[in-house]
Every structure is written in structure tokens, then in C-alpha cells.
């Protein structure tokens, strides 16, 4: 399916409002959820790695109202009303990048960030990791992705240390957590153990 000419996001789509314990409170539009101050809602972030230690990062569309032109993880968005985190993560990875691949949930966290006086993110975010070949075809959606590339993990570490201001705030938090608290879980996804891994 070619989604290039199809809008995959709408300001009026219903997002899921929750308590800090992830209890359903109600729904609201994407625009309302991201007003200054922000309303806590469900979200997810996806990191696609290669077994050789590269990660796919993308530069957000310059048309995004929040953090336009900033670099961030492979894919990030929100479950819609009636949709699970897992369903939304797989849907959006395909819609934004044209990639369908298994994803593993690594952890969940809450954060809040403000973009100038324009709006805010206040999200209860699940972080997923997937493993793909670097030769995997990437078909970025132009409304979502301005540019993209594969970066080696150590290169990302250097970029984050030298120029953190070019990255989205959620990416910086997630990258730190993945590289410190959840290294073993990430490695388990990238390098499956057991007899099947030898074939």
C-alpha cells in the first residue's frame, strides 16, 4: 500500500486521556491534548535497530506544530480511541516509514515538555524496539518525515552529547534510558538467544 498521498494524522483525531497509572479517563482531540500545559494521554515511541548496531532516526516534518525539524526516534505517535498501544505502534510504523516488523515493548514512562508558547507534550509513553536489516526499504511519509538516516549507536551518543538541542525532548529521555537502564532488554531483541539464533 502506498500511503504517500494519504494523510495519516489529523488534528481532530481522538486521543486517550489517562491517569498516571494508565487508567482511562476519556478522550479529546489531538489539538486539545497538546495545548500549553498539556493533558496526560497515551503515546508510544519506536526505535528500529539493526543487528550491527545502527538505529533509524528521522527529522520531523517542518510543518509539525511542535518541534518541527527536530531529530527524533524512528517513529512516535499516539493510540487512537479504541486502539491498544501495540496496535498503534505497528500501524504507525507502517504508515510513517512503510515498515512492518515485530516490536517489543521495553518500558513505559511519563514526561512533560513545552515547546515555546505553542503547545506541550504530556504523555504516558510506551517505548518499543524492533530489529530490521539496514537494507530494509524505508518509505517515509512526507507529512511526517523531512529526512531520515541510519546512525551507529556510538555516533548517536556523540551527537546527543555535542548537540542535544537538535533532538526532541522525549528522544533524549528515551535514548538515555535505553542506553543505561534497559541495555540488556534491547540486546535481547537485537540478538535473540537460543538454538534458533544459530540458523
Image: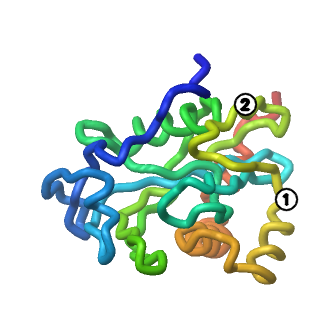
Q: Position of residue 196 (x, y in %)?
A: 73, 30
Q: Position of residue 118 (x, y in %)?
A: 42, 72
Q: How is the image coloured?
A: rainbow
Is residue 45 placed above or below 112 in the rendered structure?
above
* Residue name at image x 75 percent, y 49 percent: 148
Of labels 1 and 2, earlier in sequence is 1
* Residue name at image x 39 percent, y 71 percent: 119
Closer to viewer: mark 1 or mark 2: 1
* Residue name at image x 69 percent, y 56 percent: 59
Look at the image and tell me in which quarter the C terminus lies. Answer: top right
The crowd level at tag 2 (other Cα within 10 Å; few <14, some 14-19, many 20+) is: few
Mark number for residue 135?
none
The residue most toward the top is 1
Question: In whole angstroms, how far apart are the C-alphas of marks 1 and 2?
Answer: 26 Å
Residue 50 relative to residue 76: left or right: right
The crowd level at tag 1 (other Cα within 10 Å; few <14, some 14-19, many 20+) is: some
Q: Nearer the viewer, residue 59 or 180?
A: 59
Q: Is disc 2 placed on a helix, strand or loop?
A: helix
Residue hosting label 2: 196
The image quadrant of residue 84 is top left
* Residue name at image x 71 percent, y 54 percent: 57
Is residue 85 placed above or below 164 in the rendered structure?
above
Residue 38 relative to residue 178: left or right: left
Q: Position of residue 190 (x, y in %)?
A: 72, 47
Q: Nearer the viewer, residue 192 or 10?
A: 10
Mark number for residue 152?
1
The image quadrant of residue 114 is bottom left
Q: Position of residue 49 (x, y in %)?
A: 73, 49
The image quadrant of residue 169 is bottom right
Amino acid at each position: 500500500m502506498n500511503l504517500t498521498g494519504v494523510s495519516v494524522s489529523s488534528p481532530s483525531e481522538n486521543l486517550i486521556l489517562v491517569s498516571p497509572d494508565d487508567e482511562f479517563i476519556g478522550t479529546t482531540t489531538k489539538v486539545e491534548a497538546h495545548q500549553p500545559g498539556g493533558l496526560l494521554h497515551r503515546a508510544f515511541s519506536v526505535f528500529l535497530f539493526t543487528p550491527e548496531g545502527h538505529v533509524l532516526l528521522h527529522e520531523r516534518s517542518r510543518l509539525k506544530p511542535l518541534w518541527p525539524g527536530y531529530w527524533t526516534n524512528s517513529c512516535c505517535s499516539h493510540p487512537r480511541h479504541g486502539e491498544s498501544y501495540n496496535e498503534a505502534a505497528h500501524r504507525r510504523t507502517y504508515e510513517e516509514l512503510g515498515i512492518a516488523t515485530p516490536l517489543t515493548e521495553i518500558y513505559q514512562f511519563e514526561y512533560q515538555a513545552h515547546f515555546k508558547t505553542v503547545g506541550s507534550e504530556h504523555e504516558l509513553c510506551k517505548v518499543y524496539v524492533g530489529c530490521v536489516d539496514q537494507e530494509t526499504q524505508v518509505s517515509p511519509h512526507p507529512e511526517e518525515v523531512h529526512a531520515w538516516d541510519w546512525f551507529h549507536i556510538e555516533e548517536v551518543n556523540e551527537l546527543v552529547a555535542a548537540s542535544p538541542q537538535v533532538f526532541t525532548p522525549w528522544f533524549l529521555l528515551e535514548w538515555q534510558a535505553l542506553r543505561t537502564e534497559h541495555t540488556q532488554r534491547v540486546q535481547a531483541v537485537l540478538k535473540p538467544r537460543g538454538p534458533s539464533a544459530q540458523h
